[in-house]
Amino acid sequence: MDAPENPREPTPRQGLIALCVLGLAFHLPRLFRPLSDIDACAGPYFGVFFRNYEAYGFWNLRGMSLWRQLFPAPEMAEPYLTHPPGLWWTMYALGGDEWAMRAPTIVGAILAACCLYLIVRPKLGAWPALVAGALLLGGPAMAVYCQLSYEPVSTGIGLLMCLSTLRVMEASDAARQKWRIVQVASAFVGTWMDWSFGMYCFALVPLTASSNVRTWFSRLLPPGIATVVAVSTVIAWQKWALASPSVTAPPDAGGVVQQFRENVLTRPDTGEYLRKIAHWMRHSMGIPMLATALLGVAVFFQRSPRLTMTLLVGGASHWLLFAGHALGHPHFFCLTTPFVAASAAALWTGLASRAPRAGVFVIAAITVTTWLITYAHDRRTDSSFQRDLGAAINDAARVRDAEGQPTDEKIGVMTNFAPVWAAYVDEPTAFVVYPITDVAALESVRRDRPYRYVHLTVEKPPGVPWNDPDPVLAAWLEQFPKRELRGLEQHIYDAGYGWDWNVTGAAVYEVPRALAQLAASTAFELFDLGRTRLATLRTSGEGGELESSDDPTNSNPGWPDRPFSATRDPGTGVYIARVERTELTLRFFHDRSWTALQGDDVIARGTYSVKP
């Protein structure tokens, strides 16, 4: 039964204008602001893609993005094959800045709201349909959690395909062909944007259902053909891109098989599964909208079982099929928002004939409360930390002259902070996305030249797998000159993930070049920091062995009190000295400094001189 017409209701055009204005009001204020940790894919994915395009050439890579890190050569990276490339191509074509990455998701959210409004308007009425669009636009999922992710674009194009399918089923012959073009085009473009668009392909099954199997099949055939063609062309492009000399193909398909197993076949137990769904539904929708949707879903189903099942299938398919992946991320619940928003708005339709004033009051209160929840989420997760960290790393990569002016020389930069967003890192030597968190790794990476190390001290909740305390690394760095970075001491918060952590200290260290080789018959006289001679160590042959020629007099505990020998690791330039059962690690640097570690403790450090 269709909703009755009301002369006071807004026309379809007025409703669409209202939703566009509302969508811009929600999203434009954050268009140019710094990316925060709630912006799901900007840094770990899209930002890295754009930096690799800039470094190695979009056409040279044939449009293939490289995986998650900045590498000194493209053949060292692994191609990113998990998603179709349409969305990141669009963002890169717009420039790759904050606004360019946000623009497609903003357009996708507004498109989704407008299509939802037109889809449910004939069944729920103009005002409830407008509320459904407003809840979709202003809820936490679309307005906060799903910025810079694939899902808003998939939702917008998916609902456009559903709308055009309805118009094809209902329109006259003249209009049907125009809507058929929209239907087929949206199926093709949506597939190229992301695989999550496929959830709305599943939604076409209940939308086009008919007692006549031939009619049902004919309704599904055009968008089905367009989707199959799109998938085939994505796969063909991947094969062509992997043939580029600049890209190294993955060694085998094991990664894809393993990912399928983890995402589809490996599922949490029922209790954990339901707990995670409830957790992310609460954070991505808000309790007021969820509670209203539970009350309104029966009304929605009564008004239109077909639309109810269509939106439910589109919204629930992802976390039903891919529980191993979807339940760890809030942005996948963006796909569920149309169903929840429409069900919540349907409550107004159910109350309209029984308590119209109460219905208006309830739905207005729910809408405003949802917007306020979104505003609170947005304000609490807003942070300039990633931009500030990127600026600090870019600055550290620049070499300055005696007057403090930057020169053309660049120096390598590393860090222990794992979620560095390469969207803000544009210096070519700052390979920072791969976190270096232990001394051994530092001694094996780029030790043929000096570099700078940005070290952050972070207080974080248990279980967050980033920046675990590394006292050995911190102690090792303290031997080198450093400059404090006070601007990075910030608090970072995200209610959904449960992150509430503080950067309590930050500094950039000048790490000198490691001593790569020692010539035969060279003596090293070791001194402590007070210039007291500790020992004379002499190389023995090309193998890099060290022998002491006299007893060291250092009083540091653990330093050997008798002659000893040390064998050099040719890959790192590090000498391992063994004295009885005690193992010492000696490190020599080209700035004439050295350190000695016993286990995890730095027990001695000083300077050395070299004699033939």
Image: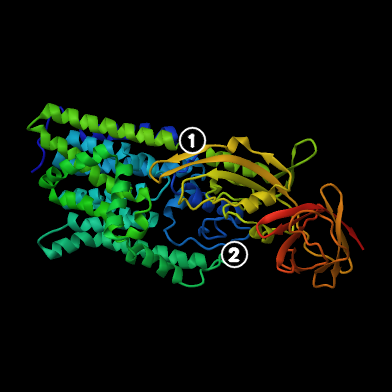
Q: Secondary structure at mark 2?
A: helix
**Above or below, comparing residue 526 to residue 545 in the picture:** above
**Residue extending furthest toward the right:** 612
Q: Secondary structure at mark 1?
A: loop
Instruction: For label 2, count other residues whose C-alpha is less than 10 Å away and answer few (under 14), some (14-19) or many (20+).
Output: some
| Tally of numbered discs | 2
Q: Residue at x 63, y 58 (%)?
A: 72
Q: Position of residue 64 (x, y in %)?
A: 50, 60
**In terms of depth relative to the viewer, which is nearer, 164 or 577?**
577
Quadrant occupied by the C terminus: bottom right
Q: Amino acid at mark 2?
A: Glu
Q: Residue at x 17, y 52 (%)?
A: 169
Tell whether 52 sits left or right of 523: left
Q: Check disc 2 and report the residue beneath it.
A: 75
Colour scheme employed for the rendering of this structure: rainbow
Q: Check disc 1 and report the residue beneath it.
A: 33
Q: Position of residue 193 (x, y in %)?
A: 39, 54
Q: Residue at x 46, y 65 (%)?
A: 238
Q: Amino acid at mark 1?
A: Arg
**In terms of depth relative to the viewer, which is nearer, 484 or 165?**
484
The numbered mark, 2 or 1, whose residue comes first in the sequence reads 1
Residue at mark 2 to residue at mark 1: CA–CA distance: 34 Å
Tell whether 117 sits left or right of 572: left
Quadrant occupied by the N terminus: top left
Q: Position of residue 410 (x, y in %)?
A: 71, 48
Q: Residue at x 15, y 58 (%)?
A: 209
Residue 360 seen in the figure? yes
Q: Position of residue 245 (x, y in %)?
A: 58, 67
Q: Which mark is residue 558?
A: none
Tell whether 344 sits left or right of 86: left
**Mark 2–mark 1 CB contact (< 8 Å):** no
